[in-house]
Amino acid sequence: MTFRLGEYIEPDFSGELFENAPEARLAAAPGDMTAPEGFHATSIFPEYFKVGKKWLLPADSRMDCVAVYEEGEIAVREFRNIKEGDLIFLGRTENCEEGIYVHDKCFRFPDEEEEKANSFSFRQSRSRETAFSYDYDSLCELLRHEKEHGHITWILGPACAFDAGAREAFSLLIERGYVDSLLAGNALATHDLEAGLLGTALGQDIKTQKARFNGHYNHIDTINKVNLYGSIPKFIEGEGIKDGIIYSCIKNRVPLLLNGSIRDDGPLPEVYEHTYIGQDAIRSHIRRSTTVIGMATVLHTIAAGNMTPAYRVTESGKIRPVYFYIVDTSEFAVNKLADRGSLAAKGIVTNVQDFVRTLAETLR
């Protein structure tokens, strides 16, 4: 199959709807971290604001934030980053009534017309009964394209490190250039490093899945040893670790972002312990991403998904889609992301170990 990016459908600003629209209203923020009454909250879609008879599009957006007008451009800012006096757009309508247009039907994707033609069909939801073979094929074509033209960010849960074959498969994806950023929590890194050091993950052998004697100590022993070295790279070098996801990231200089949670053991030295510092770090990766794939981690994937818009403005000024996948054995987890507003996310219900091994084999 030949991969084609979704085509952006630009609004016809010469139409009566846009020509007759009023200028978007602005009001100063009354204080730090505070928006004025009637502020406009952004979505995942491209949103245009009429200023000086021109329709302006924020180059970088995310949902549940405010649009700020500064120096002739629009910045999309989290509430905690609002400063007193910031000029913030007002309006709760989305179809030009208040000089704001939310462009929700903005991309034309291959096969979209065929799908629209079928008003009734079985199995339209993403469930265990869904056939995902075509998803694998199209995702692999997407990844081949993005390797040369985009930025691929992965979000991994600890289950990705529980199997020797899955660790090896994902390491191969890193080696072959299909991973530009990796987002995870303390657990993924801990169990992957535990596997490299002791051959276990949460005390179970990563090849046989058999529990080792006193194996429940293995992950905290690993954390303790990494902390003794002072950093993950020093631990990898000092202990002679030669395999695994984290090892491959360090070896290939793939940015590795680890965010902490309330229940973390340790944590490892590189884990962000402050929520908002970690959130800013996540967004610094997401704002470059053109494809995002979350595997076996609902909360981390939702966190990244809420920061991921449906579009990206390239350096050349072209508007292109951002592709978002979530892979999990649970239908609830797969559909949860859409429930939280990330409507562009596509779910694949399967075991992540099988998923990543299939991808690595297909992309070999």
Image (cartoon, rainbow, N blue to C red):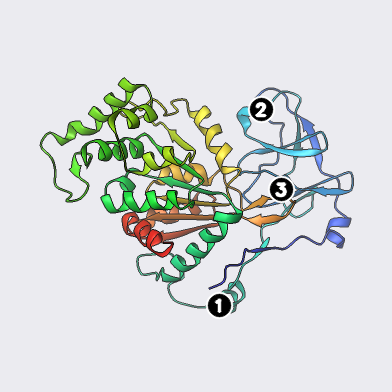
Instruction: Work out which quarter of the rendered image holds the C terminus and state it.
Output: bottom left
Query: Is residue 166 in view?
Result: yes
Task: Check disc 3: other Cα within 10 Å, few if <14, some if 14-19, many if 20+.
Answer: few
Which of these two is toward me, 36 or 107?
107
Distance between the alpha carbons at the discs numbered 3 and 1: 39 Å
Where 149 falls versus 156 (above or below)?
Answer: below
Find numbered disc 1 in the image and state the secondary structure of the residue it sits on: loop
Query: Is residue 330 in view?
Result: no
Q: Earlier in the sequence, mark 1 or mark 2?
A: 2
Residue at 27%, 46% in the rendered image: 162
Amino acid of disc 2: Thr
Distance between the alpha carbons at the discs numbered 3 and 2: 32 Å
x and y percentages locating residue 165 in the rendered image: 28, 53
Q: Which residue is identified by label 1?
A: 119
x and y percentages locating residue 66 in the rendered image: 68, 37
Circle 3 or circle 2, nearest the eye: 3
Residue at 89%, 44% in the rendered image: 52
Distance between the alpha carbons at the discs numbered 1 and 2: 45 Å
Amino acid of disc 1: Ser
Q: Which mark is residue 34?
A: 2
x and y percentages locating residue 304 in the rendered image: 51, 43
Residue at 29%, 38% in the rendered image: 191
Amino acid of disc 3: Glu
Q: Is residue 205 left or right of residue 6?
A: left
x and y percentages locating residue 229 in the rendered image: 33, 22
Which of these two is toward me, 224 or 10?
224
Residue at 44%, 45% in the rendered image: 155
Q: Earlier in the sequence, mark 3 or mark 2?
A: 2
Q: Which of the 4 image quadrants contains residue 148? A: bottom right
Q: Which of the 4 image quadrants contains residue 17? A: bottom right
Task: Check disc 1: other Cα within 10 Å, few if <14, some if 14-19, many if 20+.
Answer: few
Q: Which residue is identified by label 3?
A: 315
